[in-house]
Image (cartoon, coloured by chain):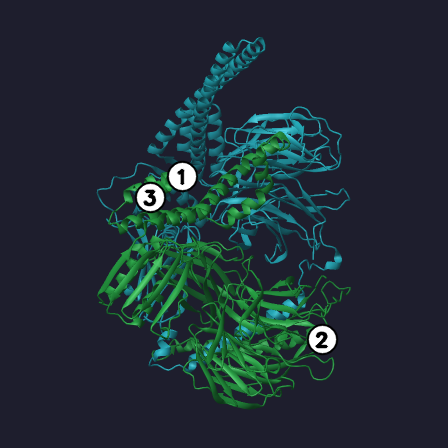
Amino acid sequence: MELNLKHVDYLQVGVTSPKTMKLLPAVGRKATQKVAVADHDGVVNCFGMKKGEAVPVFRSLPGQKISRLELGGALGTPQEKIFVCSGSEVRGYTKKGKQFLSFEANLTESINAMRVSGADLFVCASYIYNHYCDCKDQDYFLSGDKINDMVCLPVETVGRTVPVLACQDRVLRILQGSELLYDFEISGPPSVLELHNRDGGKDGEEVLYGTADGKLGLVQLTRSAPVPKWEVDNEKKKGGVLCIDTFDILGDGVKDILVGRDDGTVEIYGLDNSNEPTLRFESVLTESVTSIQGGCVGKESYDEVVTATYTGWVSGLTTEPQQMEAGPGDEVKMSRETQAKVAALRAELEQLQVKVMQGREKYQQSSQSSTAVSAVPVFSINDRFTLCQEDASYSLTLEVQTAIDNLLLQSDVPIDLLDVDKNSAVVSFSECDSEPNGNFLLATYRCQANTTRLELKVRSIEGQYGTLQAYVTPRLQPKTCQVRQYQIKPLSLHQRIHSIDHGRPTNTLRLVGQFSFAEIHSWVVFCLPEVPEKTPAGENITFYFQNTFLGTQLEASYCKGEGNFKSDNISTISILKDVLSKEATKRKINLNISYEVNEDSVSHTLKMIHPKLEYQLLLAKKVQLIDALKELQVHEGNADFLIPEYRNILDDSARLLEEYKKQPAHLERLYGMITDLFIDKFKFKGQNVKTKVSQLLEILDNYDLNSLVDFFNDA
Amino acid sequence: MLVPIFTLKLNHKINPRMVTVGKFDGVHPCLTAATQAGKVFIHNPHTRGKRQTAHRLSQSTQDSDITLLNINQAVSCLAAGTLGPNTTGDTLLVGSQTNLLAYDVHDNADIFYREVADGANAIVLGKLGNIQSPLAIIGGNCALQGFDFEGNDQFWTVTGDNVRSMVLCDFTGDGKNELLVGSEDFDIRVFKEDELVSEMAENETVTSLCHMHGSRFGYALANGTVGVYDRTARYWRIKSKNHAMSIHAFDLNGDGVVELITGWSNGKIDARSDRTGEVIFKDNFSSSVAGVVEGDYRMDGQVQLICTSVEGEVRGYLPASKEMKGNLMDTSVEQDLVRELSQRKQNLLLELRNYEENNKAVPGASEGETQMGVIPANTQLQTALSVRAATESQRAHIELSISTPNETIIRAVLIFAEGIFEGESHVVHPSAQTLSGCICVPIIPPKDIPVDLHIKAFVGGRTSTQFHVFEITRQLPRFSMYDLHVDPSTPQPKGRVTFSINDRPQRVVMWLNQNFLLPEGINNPNVTFTALRGEGLLSISMRSSGEITLNTDDIDLAGDLVQSLATFLAIEDLQAEADFPAYFEELRVTLTEVDEFHSVHQKLTAAMADHSSHIRNMLVQAEDARLMGDFKTMKKRYIELYDLNRDLINEYKIRSNNHNALLTRLKAVNQAIQRAGRLRVGKPKNQVITACREAIKNNNINALFKIMRAGTASS
């Protein structure tokens, strides 16, 4: 079935956090639903649509930024009370806008996830989970990593309170009271949780999750163990999932899954007979989708998908067919409502313009005074700097409330900036002198009008660490720019995993010295991504990592006074050794570093690289042949005379080229890592083999695994 | 939404910018394009299977609608149109780096085949000025040459650099066509026959030109800029990170005015309003666009816009019908309007909030305020430009110093300027330790052009994360790399140019002050500078009689000065006497080298012909031997053949080296004529150019130098 949805804008509010827009339950039959949306100005906005016009129901006073909005009410009644959390406070409003609850949770951190179920209130601040019943403390849990979202299985069906926490360390933690019942490991950091079918399915145990790297999955959380149902991979490299809802928009009697992502994608998945999801509809908005809800807002009896975006646009993708009034005139005739709307807006604009002019003048005048200061409030930037597993590069996304004028990128480590197709900004690299100013990259992006979101890709080299800074200047008077910093860590291409293969030959780095648990933890945080900043509870800890580019692994386990790092890649160990000893020296801590090098590990790593390298070499070779073969084909009129191998290349040419384009400089990166491996292997033996690197490159040019391994052994 | 009315997959690659449509039989339009392996294909879907193979033409076996034309040389440009007076159909013109072929596709015969020493980078077909017959005008290395239908050379002139694009249009509005030429020295020049009437300086190689309507024309640059000029005034331009492959004027929305259609390197096609540059339609190909043309391809009386991609995909678009009301994109006008207004409202609100918050700020910084980057309201940025001679550590440059008057610091400086940096911007980002309130930026403009420096400076406190952005525009005068300090030991320049003007010395002083970077104004037109880019002196002196002498060894600089002064004083015709002994000596050497290379070229061609007859003989002998069963002789012959082949390849290499050397010399000669012309203005300029050409044709080198010196051929 072809789904045809039309985009309609309803209202713009301030900047919104994820999951801050909900539809209130419909009153009576067939009526449209009201929308409740909360923004960073602290305003809760509740409105309904009447003849294409947003009619406010209520608007709360501005305050601290609101991070979540939930609906609640006594169990078994319509859930129409509005709960919001801002800072460490939870407020409740009736559907008419009367505030009936103000509850200070007394947490040191601000709340970033919240659920309401009857008289139970569940809140999560970065590492802490708290359960209140009638505003009285019930349970408490300290999570090992940041909590991104939480959900409670429905008490009505399950018969007990089961909170589920989505934690940054790629785990769903299922609690029972204040204790961990069990956890469920997923492949990406979960960013959002939602009950399947809004009620958790038949048994109330089905939970949908979305991850920051764009995956979507369903899991059944039974009393004793998790049962994974399905997971949709993010092959097209779409953005991370920010919000999920279930609603029957297709009208086939089965609830569909609505997904909003941080690159502006809105997706609708239908479930087929075997309950497997298939993508049925996709639409792309210009900015990240922070909330998504299925319902009926714009017009009676037409269902729609309502979305809220980062800059506060509430809009619908409606099933209502749009009729264009085609009059005889040259201009497209506008409906009367729209005309009224436009006129009202214009009048409002004029008034504002006058006010702004006054403000501007005053501001100009203040520049004459010698005591006045100019202080422009900080504007909000929504930024993400994440490692992409597929191509082992970082993607940086920046999103600002107003159009971006330009962006300056500066880095004090050598990194490569890659072109992103979606990005229309004109990039210009400035020459930079690394010597006095320590710049390795200076690039400006001049944005086209109306660009509020920028996406960039950055490729780092392991072992080279430092800071990437982005200076963002929006088109807003008085002009200001804000700097954001992103750490490029020494082992920047590593990613957390849940378990490692213990069968591999490993090299070990052992640290012994007078350092505390917190100190060594801070060093590990400094070296590796995806490690929680908070020192873990307990005496010792073990983390597992994988190199996203090569697939080699690292095990880091440490406690007070001792640390052990094991990896099958000798370069990883070498980098760790360098960085850790430097860090310790900086703090004047005497470290006793010892290491065990396993000779087998080198050939093991080479064997791991082998299939990738061979594939890339073959690909490069094939791509090189394509043009020549095509010319032959044109010359001879057909390709029948070619040997099948060449004919295959011709047939596959489009795919080959595509693949080649997708992985720029892949081969060079592999070469670089093999060279590092070579140097590091002998560094541990105390030999400097830099002079032999040219020989190594020669061998790589005529690549053969055995000769390479021999060279490593003999040199 | 406008959709293509036909789509074709031609299975032949298309070389970028080498696409045209011709009615070769006078009736049926055929898409004609250059493809790989020195071939041109003609797509004729109208007369299927009626053609036979002969001469250059051969039927493509892949597609019966396509005929291939063997050129046996890499094609560099392509055009089709009416050339001869009594021909029924269009003539196809194919240019390569050495030849121009005029070909009658219908009769399958060459019309003429001319050797063109300067190559053919671009070609146009049509009437120029008062010349009776239509001309095929080719643009090569610094030269323009026009041929009539008999292949006679009817038009010749020189231009500043390699020609990349040309178009014929009535620029002056006199009812006759002028020739617009875009070249690699970033200039668009307008020729009224061989008289240069206008020059527009751009900041990159001009890759495409197209006539819009009246005196309006579109242009595209190699850095991704496209825009529209009306006469010498630029109407609008936009810059993209992609490259414009082809531009074409076509009325796509049916409003009676043509739009600028641009085909981009990323496969995008867009149509922009000729007045504003606003996009009214866009579509996407999967690969780079190769060319955009128009023709009545369905033979139904309606002209279609035909877009082609490099992979051979062709799409045709009909102009929009009345019902679409110029709304070609799939958007709703009303919604866009409302959205735009709301966005503006939001922006104003944000600005207003900035002023309100600013008013609340009081002097005396707290923690939060230092983050915000509070600065005294009276902070003003001071900028100064000064010339700095070369020192041991730094090359000669212009120093732009930017400073704040108080304790605030400058975090970074971005300078956007065209044509003087590698990209479009230059960034100075001092390291955190060396932050101060003053930044000096060295600027080295690569050539003498006036430049607007758009400076953005980020000003704030040392620990701020948000900065105030100061935006200032400073103009760099045209001749900025000249220093008034003169080392007395520097030898006086031998070259000079002398001319007389009827203006007061004060006017010359004004010109000097405007065009040079002088520390304080001067009041005497007699000045001497040190040229910082090259070396040597430049001295300007003016006698009371109005005679001005420019002393410099740089003929280009002299030309620039003469042109700039003439423009400033509004002089239409200016005769000058000149002598540049060093340059003329160089030219004399070049001219003798041209002769040498020419004779070598002829010798080599003869040798080549000789060898090829040998080959023919040997092959016959070898095959004879094979048939006779005399394998010994056969083997011997084939070995000989192999040796000969190797010799031929070597000879070819010599020949091509020789050819390239010849081309650079010829370019130098053309440039010399152009430079001699630039020392004069108006009519005397054209006289010099024509007279020089005459002298070269007659191989009268002494006359050539005489003309260059005196400015006239006679006396």
What hue does chain A carry in this figure?
green
**Residue underneath mark 2:** A299
In the rendered structure, the answer to whether residue B81 lies left or right of residue A547 reads right
Above or below for B429 versus B267? below
Asked if the residue under mark 3 is in contact with the one under mark 2, i.e. CB atoms within 8 Å, the reply is: no
Q: Quadrant of the C terminus of chain B?
A: top left
Work out whether residue A261 or residue A670 is closer to the camera in this orientation and state it: A670
Q: Amino acid at mark 1?
A: Asp
| Mark 2–mark 3 distance (CA, rounded to whole Å) | 72 Å
- Residue plotted at (54% across, 52% down): B233
Q: Secondary structure at mark 1?
A: helix
Would you name the residue on which mark 1 appears? A701
Residue B622 percent across, percent down from the top left: 54, 12
Chain in cyan colour: B
> Which residue matches tag 3?
A712
Kindly report which numbered mark, 2 or 3, lies closer to the viewer in this rendering: 3
Q: If you read the primary sequence from the N terminus, does the residue marked by circle 2 or circle 1 appear first?
A: 2
- Within 10 Å of disc 1 (Cα), the crowding (few <14, some 14-19, many 20+) is few
